[in-house]
Image (tube, grey):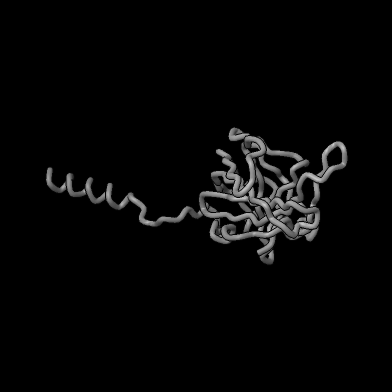
């Protein structure tokens, strides 16, 4: 009897261990993999060159927004800096990276293809340019991500937030595209 109980206990413990290496969230039809990959801005305004001038109207640098790359655990956003006002001569890149936590979207949203995404533990890397200023590593960004037709609709950042600090409404325009 004692060997039977030990065998039963051992098989129960082993069968309780999951085998997969992915983190699907617990709602049907929402797979985190569809939110990963390289995303570019859907609005063409982000493809433009944005020159910056100092208080005396002297050119300082120009900026273009780069892609947003997401994995199951990290998000990297790139910004490209140029030495001319037309963005022809790139002088460097800033890459902001944060840890991602995915969770079920709740409360007033279409739960199919919608998740909550939280970014925390920000780091900033300067490539080819002098560091300009530290990133606020304690900043926590919370948003909704909804996918439709390979485009991402984010939560309304200026709208109401739920008790967890996430938006409760989706934008009517796409922010990112694949």
User: Picture quarter containing residue 153?
Assistant: bottom right
Q: Residue at x 71, y 53 (%)?
A: 65
Image coordinates of residue 131 in percent, x first then y, are 63, 40
Q: Who's the residue at 71% across and 39% down the image?
A: 161
| Snapshot quadrant of residue 70 | bottom right
In the drawing, does residue 89 fall left or right of residue 52? left
- Furthest residue to the right? 57
Asked whether 125 or 107 is in front, the reply is: 125
Q: Who is closer to the viewer here, 34 or 89?
A: 89
Q: Picture coordinates of residue 143 (x, y %)?
A: 66, 45
Left or right of 106 in this view: 31: left
How far across and how far down the image is residue 154, in percent? 70, 51
Q: Residue furthest bottom?
A: 149
Nearer-the-camera pick, 17 or 101: 101
Residue depicted at x 47% and y 53% = 23
Residue 93 visible to the viewer: yes
**Closest to the observer: 168 or 37?**
37
* Total marks in image: 0
Q: Is residue 167 left or right of residue 102?
A: right
Percent across and percent down for residue 164 are: 63, 37
Instruction: Look at the picture and state if 50 lies above or below 34.
Output: above
Where, quadrant-wise, is the C terminus in this rendering?
bottom right
């Amino acid at each position: 009897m004692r060997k039977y109980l030990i065998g039963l206990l051992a098989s129960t413990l082993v069968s309780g261990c999951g085998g997969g290496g992915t983190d699907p969230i617990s709602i049907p039809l929402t797979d985190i993999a569809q939110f990963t990959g390289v995303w570019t801005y859907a609005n063409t305004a982000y493809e433009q060159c944005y020159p910056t001038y100092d208080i005396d109207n002297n050119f300082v640098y120009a900026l273009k927004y780069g892609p947003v790359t997401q994995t199951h655990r990290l998000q990297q956003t790139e910004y490209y800096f140029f030495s001319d006002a037309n963005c022809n001569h790139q002088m460097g890149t800033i890459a902001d990276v944060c840890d991602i936590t995915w969770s079920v979207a709740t409360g007033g949203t279409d739960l199919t293809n919608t998740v909550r995404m939280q970014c925390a533990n920000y780091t900033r890397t300067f490539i080819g340019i002098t560091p300009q200023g530290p990133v606020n590593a304690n900043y926590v960004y919370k948003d909704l991500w909804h996918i439709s037709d390979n485009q991402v609709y984010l939560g309304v950042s200026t709208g109401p937030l739920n008790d967890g600090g996430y938006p409760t409404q989706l934008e009517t325009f796409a922010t990112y595209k694949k």
